Image (cartoon, coloured by chain):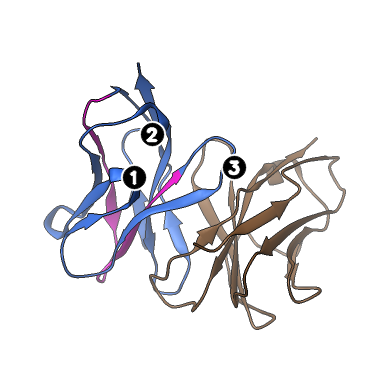
Chain colours: A blue, B brown
Amino acid sequence: AQSVTQPDIHITVSEGASLELRCNYSYGATPYLFWYVQSPGQGLQLLLKYFSGDTLVQGIKGFEAEFKRSQSSFNLRKPSVHWSDAAEYFCAVSSRDDKIIFGKGTRLHILP
Amino acid sequence: EPEVTQTPSHQVTQMGQEVILRCVPISNHLYFYWYRQILGQKVEFLVSFYNNEISEKSEIFDDQFSVERPDGSNFTLKIRSTKLEDSAMYFCAIGTSGVIGETQYFGPGTRLLVL
């Protein structure tokens, strides 16, 4: 069965520091992978997605993610975080049909 | 990016009462989804809806749940007799093609609290 694991429930980084949020997936075929962000009181906003091709995917707000098939990972990165990046981040995979399977999320805290 | 609104933003109800959660896509879309997120847990798929029919539902989506598009624009999720464990954030999502890997656009959610 398809699944997504985000091993870090909370992460705290200082403003201006680099960020990496981990995501591992379990999926039998070529995965379709997503990162969503949820700011307080907001819906889920798509940051980026991977379908095929270049394994380094660029997204909005300066985020990028790298698909590594050998490690079944799709980690999200940002070179320098801003206070406005504080939010909850969800990694997700699209299953054989069209539903999306989410990880439990990682809450990002930013120190001034 | 397509916009999706959901009403109400918050709802408190008594156990056993019926609730209707509404989703209004700003543009025309054919594929609709409901997900829920119980506090502290992952976002879970409930149901997908296309062409006025349920195309897939999860084991969570039992007989207490129903979905419909009553007027061709609103997309509703009804919980007939709420239980305490129905307390969660409910997200509506829309898609354009329903294919694997399609981007789904989510609304801001309705937080439901069952007392």
Q: Tell whether label 2 touches label 3 (CB within 8 Å).
A: no
Q: Tell whether label 1 touches label 3 (CB within 8 Å).
A: no
- In front here: B110 or A102? B110
Name the secondary structure under disc 3: loop
User: Which residue position is annotated with label 1?
Assistant: A61
Q: Please, which chain is the residue tagged with disc 2 on?
A: A
- Disc 1 residue type (three-letter): Lys
Residue B14 appears in the figure: yes
Q: Which residue does the image show at 29% across and 54% down from the upper left?
A: A25
> Measured from the top left, where is residue B84 in percent x and y?
74, 40
> Measured from the top left, where is residue A18 in percent x and y?
21, 31
Q: Tell whether label 2 touches label 1 (CB within 8 Å).
A: yes
- Examine the rendered structure and indicate whether residue A26 appears above or below residue B41: below
Q: Which residue does the image show at 26% across and 41% down from the upper left?
A: A22
- Disc 3 residue type (three-letter): Ile
- In front here: B66 or A74? A74
Q: Is residue A72 magenta?
A: no
The residue lying furthest to the top in this view is A112
Task: Assign the C terminus of chain B to one quadrant of the image.
Answer: top right
User: Which residue position is annotated with label 2?
Assistant: A85
- Disc 1: CA contacts within 10 A as few (<14), some (14-19) or many (>=20): few
- Examine the rendered structure and indicate whether residue A85 appears above or below residue A110: below
